[in-house]
Amino acid sequence: MRPLFGAIKQINLKAMTVDQLVDRFAEIGVAQDTAELMGKISKYNKLYRQMKDVDTELRARGEDARRALLRLYSHPNMQVRLQAAKKNASRCARGGSACDRGNQEVPMVSSSA
């Protein structure tokens, strides 16, 4: 079994593919959820900064890279879904096209899961 916090470490984000960055974003989100539930606020804050770094890297790669976070809208962890939605919402608020999803539908996720 993986340690709760030991798996999240600094890595070279520029060397990662977009899919790897999205997976990293989700991994950090799950660790944030655990940290918050355990009252580890300093750990949560460190993870927040790491998530911001991933988001910055995705942003630097353009709209298509940012849209890749949309696949996390159906992630089983609520923290991951929330953070992915917030990152895309902030992009929409600034007039970006990440909020223009065409005919795609956001999957509904039961809150009783």
Image (spheres, helix red, strand yellow):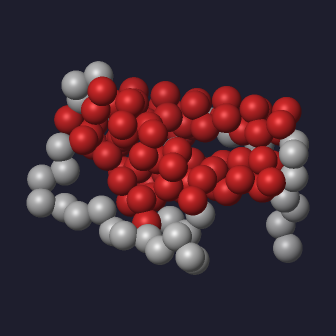
The correct choice, above or below, for 68 with respect to 15 in the image is below
Which of these two is toward me, 12 or 86?
Answer: 86
The correct choice, above or below, for 106 with respect to 61 in the image is below
Which of these two is toward me, 23 or 80?
Answer: 80
Q: Is residue 6 left or right of residue 33?
A: right
In the picture, the quarter occupied by the N terminus is bottom right
Q: Position of residue 67 (x, y in %)?
A: 31, 46
In the picture, the quarter occupied by the C terminus is bottom right
Q: Position of residue 25 (x, y in %)?
A: 56, 48
| In the image, farthest residue toward the top | 94
User: Residue at image x 87%, y 61%?
Assistant: 3
User: Residue at image x 60%, y 53%?
Assistant: 79
Let me know if residue 49 appears in the view: yes
User: Residue at image x 20%, y 35%?
Assistant: 97
Q: Position of residue 39 (x, y in %)?
A: 87, 45
Q: Is residue 7 left or right of residue 69?
A: right
Q: Position of residue 112 (x, y in %)?
A: 56, 76
Q: Quadrant of residue 106?
A: bottom left
The correct choice, above or below, for 96 with respect to 38 in the image is above
| In the image, farthest residue toward the front | 112
Let me know if residue 18 appears in the view: no
Q: Quadrant of residue 42?
A: top right
| In the image, farthest residue toward the bottom | 113
